Image (cartoon, coloured by chain):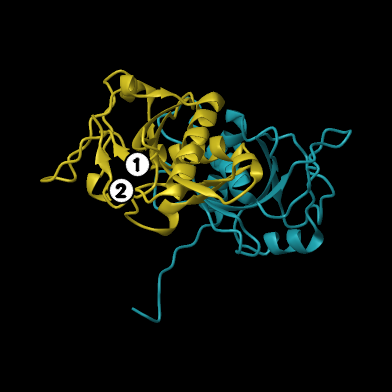
Chain colours: A cyan, B yellow
C-alpha cells in the first residue's frame, strides 16, 4: 500500500538530482546539487548555480517532500509542509524552496518558501515542474538576482 | 576551451543509475562513491529475489557521456584496474547518454556458474599487471541496452550465481576467454 513518507529515500533523491542536472540542450547544467543526507534536520539539498560570472557562487537550499499517494482532486501533490518545517526554512538567510516529489511518476515540483508567505501547506502546488526548462531558468535567474542584490563576502576573521 | 563539466556527467550518470535501479521496490542502493573514496565502483546494490530471503549484493560503476562527444568519437571509458582487483562482487558498468538519458551496460566482473556448479567471477576487461591505470577501451558495440528486461536478466543471473556460491566458496577471480 502506498504511504506518505517523510524520508526522502534514494529514489526521491535521484529524481530531484536528475531533474536539477538536466541540461535542456545547454552545454552545462543549470545547477550542481548536493544531497546533505537524511539526518540533516531541515535541508535535504544544497544547490549551487553553475556558470555564473563574477565573484559569487550563488546557491539555494531545498527540502524535499516525497509521496506515493499522488494528487488531490485539485491537482495538488499529496505532500505536507508543517508550520515548524516552514518556519525552519525561512530562517535561513538564503533562498529556500520545497521540492515536492511524486515518487511513482518520477515528477518533481518546486515551491518557494518566503518570509511573510504561507506558513504551511496541506498539499503542494504543482505549477512549477522541475522537468521544464523555463522552471529551471526562472529558478536560476531568481537565485542569481538574490545574491547579486544581497550577497556579502567574508572580509575579516579572528583566525587571520 | 570550455569549462570542464566531467563532474556533471559523473553526477548525472550516478543519479540516472540510482533512478533506474530504485524504480524497483526490491532493490536498495547505497552510494559507495559518497562514502568511500577509491572503492572501485559508485553504487552498492542489494536485492532480495521476490522480496524474500537474504539480500544479494552487486556493484555498479556509472559513467556518463555526451551524445555529441561519446557517440560520434567512439567511447573511451577509463576503468581503474587497480581498484577492480579489490572488488569481489559482481560488477556492472552502466553507461548513460546524459542528453537523452538512455543507458547501456556490460559486465566488468561477471558472475558465472561453471558446468561443475562452481560459482566464479570472471573479468572480461583485460587487467594490466604493469599499469593499472591504463584505461580499458570499451566501445559502444561492447554494450547492451539497459532496460527493465535487461535488469531482470541481470538479477536472475546474480541470484543464480549467489545460490551456487553459497554451496561452495568462490575461487580467486579468473580472466575470461
The residue sitting at the left extreme is B130
The location of residue B49, given as percent across then percent down, is: 60, 41
The location of residue A139, given as percent across then percent down, is: 59, 40
Circles 1 and 2 on the same subunit: yes
- Residue at image location 41% in from the left, 69% down from the top: A155
- Residue at image location 43% in from the left, 53% down from the top: B32
The location of residue A119, given as percent across then percent down, is: 81, 57
How many dots with numbers?
A: 2
Mark 1 belongs to chain: B
The Cα atoms of the two marked residues, 1 and 2, are separated by 6 Å
Instruction: Determine whether B61 is above or below B166 in the image.
Output: above
Locate the N terminus of chain B by quadrant: top left
What residue sits right under mark 1 in the picture? B120
The location of residue A66, given as percent across then percent down, is: 70, 46
Locate the C terminus of chain B by quadrant: top left
What residue sits right under mark 2 in the picture? B171
From the viewer's perspective, tell me whether residue B9 is left or right of residue A43: left
Amino acid at each position: 500500500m502506498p504511504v506518505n513518507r517523510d524520508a526522502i529515500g534514494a529514489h526521491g533523491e535521484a529524481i530531484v538530482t536528475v531533474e536539477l542536472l538536466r541540461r535542456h540542450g545547454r552545454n552545462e547544467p543549470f545547477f550542481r546539487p548536493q544531497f546533505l543526507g537524511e539526518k540533516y534536520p531541515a535541508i535535504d539539498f544544497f544547490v549551487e548555480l553553475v556558470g555564473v560570472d563574477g565573484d559569487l557562487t550563488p546557491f539555494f537550499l531545498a527540502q524535499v517532500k516525497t509521496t506515493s499517494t499522488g494528487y488531490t482532486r485539485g491537482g495538488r501533490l499529496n505532500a505536507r509542509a508543517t508550520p515548524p518545517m516552514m518556519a525552519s526554512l525561512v530562517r535561513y538567510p538564503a533562498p529556500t524552496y520545497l521540492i515536492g516529489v511524486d515518487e511513482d511518476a518520477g515528477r518533481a515540483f518546486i515551491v518557494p518558501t518566503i518570509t511573510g508567505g504561507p506558513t504551511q501547506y496541506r498539499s503542494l502546488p504543482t505549477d512549477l515542474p522541475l522537468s521544464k526548462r523555463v522552471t529551471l531558468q526562472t529558478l536560476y535567474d531568481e537565485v542569481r538576482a538574490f545574491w547579486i542584490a544581497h550577497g556579502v563576502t567574508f572580509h575579516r576573521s579572528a583566525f587571520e | 576551451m570550455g569549462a570542464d563539466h566531467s563532474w556533471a556527467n559523473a553526477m548525472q550518470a550516478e543519479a540516472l543509475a540510482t533512478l533506474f535501479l530504485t524504480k524497483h521496490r526490491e532493490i536498495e542502493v547505497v552510494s559507495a562513491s559518497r562514502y568511500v573514496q577509491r572503492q572501485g565502483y559508485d553504487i552498492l546494490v542489494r536485492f532480495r529475489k521476490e522480496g524474500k530471503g537474504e539480500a544479494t549484493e552487486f556493484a555498479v560503476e556509472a559513467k556518463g557521456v555526451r551524445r555529441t562527444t561519446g557517440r560520434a568519437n567512439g567511447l573511451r571509458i577509463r576503468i581503474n584496474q587497480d581498484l577492480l582487483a579489490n572488488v569481489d562482487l559482481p560488477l556492472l558498468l552502466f553507461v548513460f547518454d546524459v542528453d537523452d538519458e538512455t543507458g547501456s551496460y556490460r559486465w566488468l566482473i561477471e558472475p558465472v556458474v561453471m558446468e561443475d556448479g562452481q560459482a566464479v567471477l570472471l573479468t572480461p576487461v583485460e587487467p594490466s599487471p604493469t599499469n593499472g591505470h591504463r584505461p580499458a577501451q570499451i566501445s559502444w558495440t561492447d554494450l547492451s541496452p539497459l532496460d527493465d528486461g535487461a535488469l531482470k536478466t541481470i538479477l536472475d543471473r546474480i541470484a543464480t550465481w549467489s545460490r551456487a556460491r553459497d554451496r561452495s566458496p568462490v575461487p580467486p577471480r579468473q580472466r575470461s576467454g
